[in-house]
């Protein structure tokens, strides 16, 4: 029997951010809720196909299309939860001197400022997507990645530590399309570095890849 657990949208209390308006957040929360709803719809429809325990030949085209869309909708849901979850009112600035994230950035890039230049650079890349700082669970190394849409470029098993939405809907009510750098400044003014530390502390170690390499 196929179990079908339903996802529910999380609530985020983010009003009063610096440089990202409440109106933008309101629209953005609605979009996020759409990804949660669509993830549930896909799972429901796939469960419907699997109800008789098999995928018939004539079901294959629709089943394939539903399954291909999982990456878009699931990542649309999950990445927004990471994004909203790493923002906070009256937060921002830079991570404290003794923060684990700063130390990891220094170990990986030589200096926190170099890590930041890279992350901001990724965020300014042309196209629709995300800038994500991941940690490799094998060796703790940080690396910044460009994700096209929601699903192209995520690294399997890596831990997302800092997630920045650079789809235009994230800032278009507050800035012009060409003003993405201003939005990126606003993003950094609202980063909840304590949340990043918590992600770092909770990050798993990759014992499976270690085992495979030994
Ligand atoms: Fe978004």
Image (cartoon, helix red, strand yellow):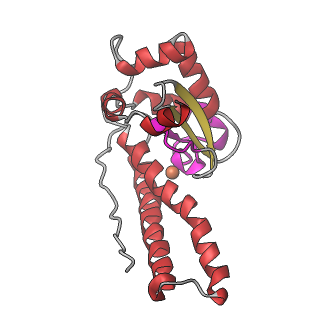
Residue 104 in percent (x, y) is at 44, 19
At 46% from the left edge and 73% from the top edge, which residue is drawn?
43
For residue 92: magenta?
Answer: no
Residue 94 or 5: which is nearer the viewer?
Answer: 5
On the rendered structure, is 130 left or right of 32?
right
Left-right relation of 151 to 47? right
Q: In the rendered image of this protein, does residue 9 appear above or below residue 40? A: above
Q: Residue at x 50, y 77 (%)?
A: 46
- 68 relative position to 201: left or right: right
Residue at the location (42% across, 35% down)? Answer: 207
**Is residue 180 on the magenta stretch?**
yes
The spot of residue 146 in percent (x, y) is 62, 38
Expressed as whole percent of the image width and height from the top left, the position of residue 156 reads 54, 45
Q: Quadrant of residue 84?
A: top left
Q: Is residue 136 above or below residue 57?
A: above
Residue 178 % position (x, y): 67, 38
**Front residue of this view, candidates 21 and 55:** 55
Q: Residue at x 38, y 47 (%)?
A: 22
Give the residues in magenta. 154-182
Residue 112 visible at all: no
Quadrant position of the N terminus in the picture? bottom left
* Residue sticking out furthest to the front: 214
């Amino acid at each position: 029997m196929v179990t079908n657990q339903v996802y529910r949208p999380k609530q985020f209390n983010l009003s009063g951010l610096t440089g990202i308006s409440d109106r933008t957040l309101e629209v953005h929360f609605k979009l996020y809720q759409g990804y949660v709803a669509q993830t549930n719809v896909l799972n429901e429809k796939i469960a419907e196909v699997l109800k008789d325990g098999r995928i018939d030949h004539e079901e294959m085209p629709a089943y394939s299309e539903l399954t291909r869309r999982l990456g878009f909708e699931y990542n649309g849901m999950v990445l927004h939860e990471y994004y909203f979850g790493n923002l906070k009112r009256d937060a921002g600035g830079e991570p404290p001197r003794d923060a684990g994230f700063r130390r990891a950035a220094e170990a990986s890039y030589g200096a926190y400022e170099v890590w930041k230049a890279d992350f901001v650079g990724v965020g300014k890349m042309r196209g629709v997507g995300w800038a994500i700082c991941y940690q490799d669970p094998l060796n703790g190394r940080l690396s910044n990645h460009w994700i096209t849409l929601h699903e192209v470029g995520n690294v399997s098993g890596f831990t997302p530590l800092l997630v920045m939405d650079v789809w235009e809907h994230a800032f278009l009510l507050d800035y012009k399309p060409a003003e993405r750098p201003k939005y990126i400044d606003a993003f950094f003014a609202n980063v909840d570095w304590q949340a990043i530390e918590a992600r770092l502390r909770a990050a798993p170690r990759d014992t499976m890849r270690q085992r495979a390499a030994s």
